[in-house]
Image: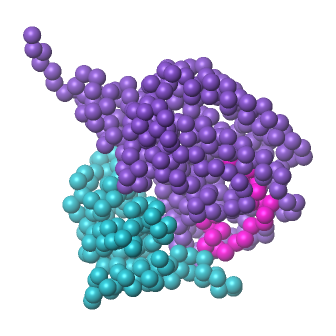
Chain colours: A cyan, B purple
Amino acid sequence: MTLEQIQKKLAEFYKGIAIELIEGVKHPVTQAQTGDSCLVVPADKIKDICKTLKTIEQFSFDCLSNLTAVDRKDRFEVVYHLFSYKHRHSLTLKAVLPRDDSAHIETVEGVWSCANWLEREVYDLFGIKFDNHSDLRRIMLPDDWIGHPLRKDYKEEEDYHGISTTRPPLLS
Amino acid sequence: MELNTEEMLLNMGPQHPSTHGVIRFVVKTDGEVMSAAVPDIGYLHRSIEKIAEKATYNGFMPWTDRVDYLAAMNCNVAYAMAVEKIAGIEISRRAEYLRVIAMELNRIISHLLAVGSLGMDIGAYTPFVHALREREKANDLIEELCGQRLTYNYARIGGVIYDMTPNWDAKVLAFLEQFEPLLNEFDRLLTDAKILKKRLGGVGVVTAEEAINYNLVGPNLRGSGVKWDLRKDMPYSVYPELDFEVPVGTGEAGVLGDCFDRYNVRMKEMRESVKILRQCFERIPAGEYQVKVPKKIRPPAGDVYVRTESTRGDLGVYLVSDGSDKACRVKFRCGSFNAMSIVEKISRGMMVADLIAFIASLDIVAPEIDR
């Protein structure tokens, strides 16, 4: 299915809910599309939509290829890259969240098992909370780490348990 | 007489010879049978994705080596492909072939270590030495190509950094000539050995549904019987022009998707890589190996997700550009990370000794998990 077909079919299931198609970026000279197009869906409907995308035969997105987030300074984007082994089509889904500490979104762990760890990684590095996640702990960093490093405004603490995080320059 | 038993918490790692890097497992066990092995990762987290936001597009290339040091060439190329795709850069055919040659040589190097260390982990030391001996020869070849033995830093945005040295192709072909019969020897020594089949057969079974649900990729996915290889099914670079097979697990040592299947897929893939390399040297055209690109690359603001078949399977690079000369976000979606997340599920009810075999058969590389 092409992205337009997916959008149209999804709109049949979710009447009155905005599912926006954003075209991928075009090359400034050749005007050929070089970026990926995506569907932007409301964050509060994400689990429902993902379940539909996995279970409805025409979609059959049986594989969550990637789940990550992007800090856009004024908002968080949670990005889902879905893929179907059956129909061999892929889809980029995005959900936009407010950019503050209260940012949260429903987990899709129940839809694809691999989302468990991918969401833990996003929680650890961006501080986006996943509601109803079975095991929302830090995964890369120690449990007592302060801050979420992949945020654009992250400031590293001066020390961690008395170990300095900076060192004097080797050349003075 | 009744013996009171109670569940024990055992710590395996972070420094453990069988964990292939710095990973820790919290093993819950009652005697030899585990109730679960919970992986604890992050010991090798070097915040490569944050560094990507601070470095220029070209300047980040050496860091991609460190994502997966056993398949540095694949990481180089995956990142370069992502930048080229969004910036709309077309590279020359010669560069494509040089990349494929380097990647397939890298696949042999990586798989040799994977199958060798699997043997060593379960007690067969000799095959490991044989594998490393061959790996050294391949390392010498790749050193002649790009000057490095491990962290190659070979691909560039717009091509590769060096052309092959004179007569290098003959050296590689000579290596393949003597390497291919050695694969048969390796098969006799390890694959066909009854002990290995009994040791790996039926252990750590991952069904095709589980593999897809946990997004296992590459040899781990194919070991479960899913015939899926990005080089064949979503072809990129010059792979469509090359003729090779995609080996899948058959369950010949026990159950489909067991440790032996994953091991055997890797053994067979090395033969396919030999085939690909031979074809590449027949077909490689003359020409430029690097196209002209601006010193500071400023791709248009947008995002792109590129998937390539690395030695550990589908390596996804998600690149977000904001129009400046530094990336807004780079995410490496690595095979080892997903492979690690299935360990807890599969390890339930497994013997402690089988956990070693299971981890080895997943071919996990710790830096790739943590990045």
**In the shown orientation, is residue B177 left or right of residue B70?**
right
- Please provide the residue range marked out in magenta: B81-105
Classified by dominant secondary structure, the portion drawn in magenta counts as helix
B142 in relation to B84, above or below: above
Please say whether residue B330 is visible from this viewpoint.
Answer: no
B369 in relation to A94, above or below: above
B120 in relation to B256, above or below: above
| Residue A151 pos. (x, y %) | 40, 64
- Which part of the image, by quadrant, shows the N terminus of chain B? top left
Q: Residue at x 27, y 27 (%)?
A: B33
Q: Nearer the viewer, residue B49 or B111?
A: B111
Q: Picture quarter containing residue B57?
A: bottom right
| Residue B72 pos. (x, y %) | 62, 47
**Would you say residue B281 sits in the magenta stretch?**
no
Q: Residue at x 60, y 19 (%)?
A: B126
Query: Could you tell me how many numbered marks the image carries?
Result: 0
Q: Residue at x 83, y 36 (%)?
A: B174
| Residue B56 pos. (x, y %) | 62, 64
Q: Residue at x 28, y 23 (%)?
A: B32
B34 in relation to A160, above or below: above
**Would you say residue B102 sits in the magenta stretch?**
yes
Residue furthest to the left in view is B1
| Residue B368 pos. (x, y %) | 50, 46
Q: Picture quarter containing residue A44?
A: bottom left
Residue furthest to the bottom in view is A16
Residue furthest to the top in view is B1
Please say whether residue B241 is visible from this viewpoint.
Answer: yes
